[in-house]
Image (cartoon, helix red, strand yellow):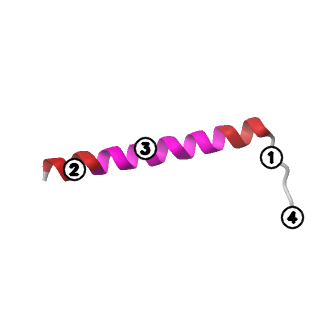
Amino acid sequence: MEQEVSPSEAAAGSQALQGTLYQALSSWGHATRAA
């Protein structure tokens, strides 16, 4: 079941993933500093 992913789709997906990761890290950092 192979699915072709266009470069723009892959880029959008990785950008969304990076954004989510960044948000999680930054909120975790804020929580750590506040503690």
Q: CA distance from mark 1 to mark 2?
A: 37 Å
Pointer 4: what residue? 1
Describe residue 25's horizontal placement relative to residue 17 as left or right: left
Kindly report the distance in space between the C-alpha atoms of the residues bearing marks 1 and 4. 13 Å
Q: Which residue is identified by label 2?
A: 31
Spatial distance from mark 3 to mark 4, Cα to Cα? 31 Å
Q: Residue furthest top?
A: 8
- Prevailing secondary structure class for the magenta stretch in the rendered image: helix
Pointer 3 or 2: first along the chain:
3
Mark 3 or mark 1, earlier in chain: 1
In magenta, the rendered stretch is: 12-28
Q: Residue drawn at (17%, 48%), measured in percent from left and top?
A: 33
Q: Give coordinates of residue 30: x percent, y percent.
A: 23, 45
The tag earlier along the polypeptide, 1 or 2, is 1
Secondary structure under tag 2 reads helix
Q: Mark 1: give few (<14), some (14-19) or many (20+) Cα within 10 Å.
A: few
Q: Is residue 8 shown in magenta?
A: no
Instruction: Please name the residue shown 71% across and 43% down the image.
Output: 10
Image coordinates for residue 13, horizontal then vertical, percent: 64, 43
| Amino acid bearing label 3 | Tyr
* Amino acid at dot 2: Ala
Q: Amino acid at mark 1?
A: Val
Q: CA distance from mark 3 to mark 2?
A: 14 Å
Query: Element at badge 1?
Result: loop
Judge left or right: residue 8 versus residue 22: right
Please state which of the two labelled residues, at mark 3 or mark 4, is closer to the viewer: 3
Instruction: Using the rendered view, name the quadrant where residue 16 is placed.
Output: top right
Which residue matches tag 1?
5
Q: Quadrant of the N terminus?
A: bottom right
